[in-house]
Image (cartoon, rainbow, N blue to C red):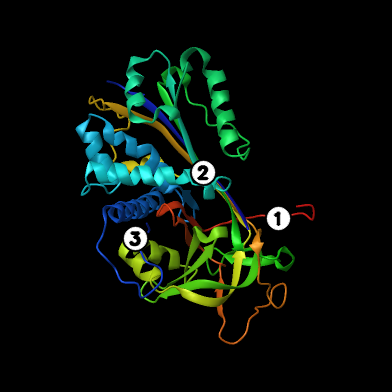
């Protein structure tokens, strides 16, 4: 598969003065290190933010996609402000309340620096830049929060159109030209600083799907009564598969080349209320227990070839989690550092390409396999993680309820 992901996070700053589970059963748990506490906190934040995004969604069947690493990369530097309320709320939202400043700094630095690893040079990268209004004293506090290599002085007030064009060009370079449309235009007269974050992932399956065997008229059930046609990729592969009878959900690991990053699909047993029930009970402990059931199986897999494009309600979700001190309000109390127009856009495509494949025995719509094989048919709403083993972090998390079919021509 080629998995192409754009996560675009835009923040307007208006300043005034390891995975928490062991997914192979039977491994003994040792003492929890400071690094493990950080990554466990990161995963709890991921689940909290996911739940808040779902709750803030305007439609019960909305897709959801976001980058926990990307959001944390923007929020974590705000811990260094002198505003006690801001730092308290950031700690609370990011689940850092019981950690020392040194633990947080060490964990955050390791997570972000991970993206400089040669393994990610062409497939996965995180980049962000803070564009500051030149000669603005109120924006100088932002210079102390972010690394110098990620800051650039510009003139929004008198040269806003050209500045925004330059920012769009920067995003285009960082994403390999995946962004066709420009960023949402921010009123330049009010801008003191603009933070732009890009998380870009273009991975290949460890075991690719044979495009000749993709069934063009597969069915995806939004509910048991509502369905639509979508191309369904087919494979018979050795993959880690697990199940939780309590959550009524199965989990499958789909590794990318090198096995340093994997996609985990959580597929509820039921199309109608399965996703709702799973989301009601999704906790770090429950997910840890689910992943402990994973073991290698011969799996007959069907997975849609799809695209999803999401602008999640990130600011509303963060406010609902308690991050209120950094957003503009109509009250008389003015925060020492404001975030405004907190926009996060995520786009992904899932198709067949990878390194190799184990072809099914027959093409098209018939089930294939032998006695003892397992079946994993992703034909109704599901949740997924893209997990980075090196950084012990969630690069992406999403829910897919209505995937957009990708129809390929013979020339693709």
Res 125 label: 2
Whichever of labels 1 and 2 marks the residue nearer the N terminus, that label is 2
User: In the picture, residue 91 is in which quadrant?
Assistant: top left
Res 20 label: 3
- Residue 287: x %, y % from top left: 36, 65
Quarter of the rendering occupied by the N terminus: bottom right
- Residue 205: x %, y % from top left: 60, 60
- Residue 24: x %, y % from top left: 41, 71
Whichever of labels 2 and 3 marks the residue nearer the N terminus, that label is 3
Q: Are marks 2 and 3 in contact (CB under 8 Å)?
A: no
Distance CA(mark 2)–CA(mark 3) = 23 Å
For disc 1, the marked residue is 407
User: In the picture, residue 324 is in which quadrant?
Assistant: top left
- Residue 252: x %, y % from top left: 49, 68
| Residue at left offset 35%, top offset 72% | 27
Distance CA(mark 1)–CA(mark 3) = 37 Å
Distance CA(mark 1)–CA(mark 2) = 28 Å
From the viewer's perspective, tell me whether residue 41 is left or right of residue 193.
left
Considering every residue shown, the one lying at the far right of the view is 410
Res 48 label: none
From the viewer's perspective, tell me whether residue 32 is left or right of residue 343.
left
User: In the picture, residue 370 is in which quadrant?
Assistant: bottom right
In this view, the mark in front (1 or 2): 2
Q: Does dot 2 land on a helix, a strand or a loop?
A: strand
Instruction: Residue 197: tell me if it is visible.
Output: no
Q: Does dot 1 land on a helix, a strand or a loop?
A: loop
In this view, the mark in front (1 or 3): 3
Residue 115 sits above or below residue 17 on the image: below
Instruction: Residue 329: tell me if it is visible.
Output: yes
């Amino acid at each position: 598969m080629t998995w192409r992901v754009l996560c675009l996070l835009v923040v307007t700053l208006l300043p005034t003065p390891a995975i928490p589970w062991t997914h192979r059963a039977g491994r003994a748990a040792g003492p929890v290190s400071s690094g493990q506490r950080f990554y466990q906190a990161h995963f709890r934040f991921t689940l909290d933010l996911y739940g808040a995004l779902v709750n803030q969604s305007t439609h019960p069947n909305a897709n959801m996609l976001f980058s926990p690493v990307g959001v944390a990369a923007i929020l974590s530097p705000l811990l260094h402000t002198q505003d006690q309320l801001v730092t308290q709320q950031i700690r609370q939202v990011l689940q850092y309340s019981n950690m020392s400043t040194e633990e947080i700094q060490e964990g955050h630095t390791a997570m972000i620096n991970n993206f400089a690893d040669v393994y990610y040079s062409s497939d996965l990268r995180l980049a962000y830049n803070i564009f500051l209004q030149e000669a603005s004293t109120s924006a100088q506090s932002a210079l102390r929060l972010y690394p110098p290599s990620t800051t650039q002085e510009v003139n929004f007030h008198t040269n806003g159109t050209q500045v925004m064009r330059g920012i769009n060009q920067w995003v285009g370079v960082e994403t390999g030209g995946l962004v066709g449309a420009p960023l949402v235009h921010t009123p330049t007269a009010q801008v003191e600083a603009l933070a732009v974050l890009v998380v870009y992932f273009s991975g290949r399956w460890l075991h690719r799907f044979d495009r000749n065997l993709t069934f063009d008229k597969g069915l995806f059930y939004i509910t048991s009564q509502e369905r639509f046609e979508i191309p369904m990729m087919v494979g018979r592969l050795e993959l880690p598969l697990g199940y939780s009878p309590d959550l009524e959900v199965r989990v499958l690991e789909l590794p990318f080349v090198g096995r340093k990053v994997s996609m985990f699909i959580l597929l509820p047993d039921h199309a109608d209320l399965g996703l709702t029930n799973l989301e009601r009970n999704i906790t770090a402990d429950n997910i840890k227990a689910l992943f402990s059931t994973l073991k290698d199986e011969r799996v007959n897999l069907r997975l849609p070839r799809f695209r999803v494009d999401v602008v999640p309600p990130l600011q509303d979700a963060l406010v609902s989690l308690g991050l209120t001190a950094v957003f503009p309000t109509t009250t008389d109390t003015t925060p020492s550092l404001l975030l405004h127009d907190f926009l996060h856009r995520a786009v992904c495509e899932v198709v067949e390409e990878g390194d190799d494949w184990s072809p099914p025995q027959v093409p098209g719509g018939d089930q294939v396999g032998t006695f003892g094989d397992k079946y994993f048919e992703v034909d109704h709403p599901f949740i997924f993680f893209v997990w980075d083993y090196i950084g012990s972090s969630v690069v992406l998390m999403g829910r897919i309820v209505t995937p957009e079919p990708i129809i390929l021509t013979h020339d693709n």
